[in-house]
Image (cartoon, rainbow, N blue to C red):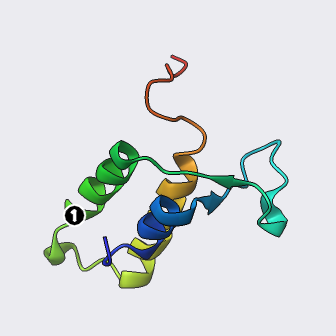
Amino acid sequence: MNKYPAVKAALDTGFASTVAGDTALDDSVRVALNQGQAAAIVSALEKVPPSALVPVEDLRVAEEAMVEAAATLPPGRPHAR
């Protein structure tokens, strides 16, 4: 997980949620990432082939966005169709 600091941080201490209704801009509301969510995020990031030449910063932004998105649809919660 050291390769993915946002995932690691969210597993270790939770992450500041900016989901609508949360007041976490001051870091007071923290949402925990579970192992399944972390595994899914890492799997998606690992599927990006090196030949795609995606800049590291873009991957970091994608990682952070997926960590935050995990708060909106935790595992086991059905999604709207």
Residue that appears at 21% across and 73% down: 52
Instruction: Name the residue furthest front.
Output: 12
Residue that appears at 55% across and 48% down: 69
Crowding around mark 1 (Cα neighbors within 10 Å: few <14, some 14 to 19, many 20+) is: few
Expressed as whole percent of the image width and height from the top left, the position of residue 4 reads: 36, 72
Question: Could you say which is closer to the camera, residue 38 or residue 53?
Answer: 38
Expressed as whole percent of the image width and height from the top left, the position of residue 37 reads: 39, 46
Residue 71 quadrant: top right
Kindly identify which residue carries mark 1: 46
Q: Quadrant of the N terminus?
A: bottom left
Looking at the picture, which amino acid does disc 1 mark? Glu
Relative side of 2 to 67, left or right? left
Residue that appears at 44% across and 24% down: 76
Relative side of 73 to 58, left or right? right
Question: Could you say which is closer to the camera, residue 36 or residue 73?
Answer: 36
Reply above or below: 7 against 32.
Answer: below
Residue that appears at 44% across and 32% down: 75
Expressed as whole percent of the image width and height from the top left, the position of residue 78 reads: 49, 19
Reply above or below: 48 against 17.
Answer: below
Relative side of 32 to 44, left or right? right
How many circles with numbers are drawn on the protein?
1
Q: Secondary structure at mark 1?
A: helix
Residue 3 quadrant: bottom left
Q: Is residue 81 visible?
A: yes
Relative side of 15 to 41, left or right? right
